[in-house]
Amino acid sequence: MEKQAVMEKIRNLGMLAVIRGPSPELTIKMVNALVAGGVMGIEITYSTPNAEQVVTELDQIFGEKILLGIGTLTDPDQAKSAKAAGAKFLVSPVCEPGLVKAMVASGLANMAGALTPTEVLQAYKLGTDVVKIFPGTLGGPAYIKALKGPFPYISMMPTGGVSAANVAEWFAAGVVAVGAGSELCPPQLAKEGKFDEITRRASDFVKVVAAARLAAK
């Protein structure tokens, strides 16, 4: 899938599930549960054991049925190895120039992390496609709205602090998508084998994201 198509898919989905799996096996079961609930944008973080192996296996299972990426990149070399594993997009919580340049050079859709206005502008100038506002919990939707004042042309996606209860506020503030982690798919639920609950949460999230995006148009 070409980079432009990936970016369009992210915008259309409006949400990426950010998964910090407790083990490779449970991570794959978590993704199955999310997909059953209608979540089709999946970010496997490097904090997941054997993350690249997990992505390769998920790519073999789902192919283009889902949009699959790798997150929590902290080393430039990970950009190449993540792409080789089958990732279609890359996400980092930081805006370290060498890392962002490697992510851009991969040719994949990419999102560099930033928080302050200076970091947001730096990430944009380095060529990132979407600035990941992290942690979103610190400023909330009001902070995104404030950033959009001087930077209306920069695409932003919050991760951290995103819940079904406040999704509408994020989209109203002008984000292109949201990253949902523990509120959507808590690792503890996977450890307890409560995959039906993950599917239920996924279904609820998909509905509120769709409604929020429609209202924000």
Image (tube, grey):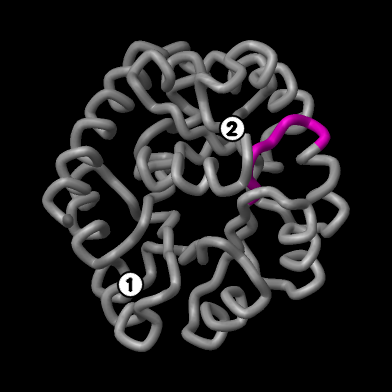
Q: Tell me which residue sits at (45%, 40%) in the image.
A: 9
Q: Residues within 10 Å of mark 1 (few under 14, many from 20)?
A: many
Q: Residue furthest left?
A: 215
Q: Of the residues under marks 2 and 1, which one precedes in the sequence? A: 2
Q: Nearer the viewer, residue 155 or 8?
A: 8
Q: Nearer the viewer, residue 105 or 50?
A: 105
Q: Which residues are magenta?
A: 84-90
Q: Tell me which residue sits at (44%, 55%) in the image.
A: 159
Q: Nearer the viewer, residue 129 or 93?
A: 129
Quarter residue 48 falls in: top right
Where is residue 25 drawn, in percent x and y? 66, 14
In the rendered structure, the answer to whether residue 99 lies left or right of residue 205 reads right
Where is residue 97 drawn, in percent x and y? 75, 75
Quadrant of image for the N terminus = top right
Where is residue 22 drawn, in percent x and y? 62, 28
Q: Residues within 10 Å of mark 2 (few under 14, many from 20)?
A: many
How far apart are the alpha carbons under marks 2 and 1?
A: 25 Å
In the rendered structure, the answer to whether residue 60 lies left or right of residue 176 reads right
| Mark 1, residue position | 144
The amino acid pointed to by label 2 is Leu
Image vertical order of residue 155 relative to residue 186, above or below? below
Q: Tell me which residue sits at (30%, 67%) in the image.
A: 140
Of marks 2 and 1, the one in the foreground: 2
The amino acid pointed to by label 1 is Ile
Quarter residue 211 falls in: top left
Q: Secondary structure at mark 1?
A: helix
| Mark 2, residue position | 68
Q: Tell me which residue sits at (59%, 32%) in the image.
A: 68
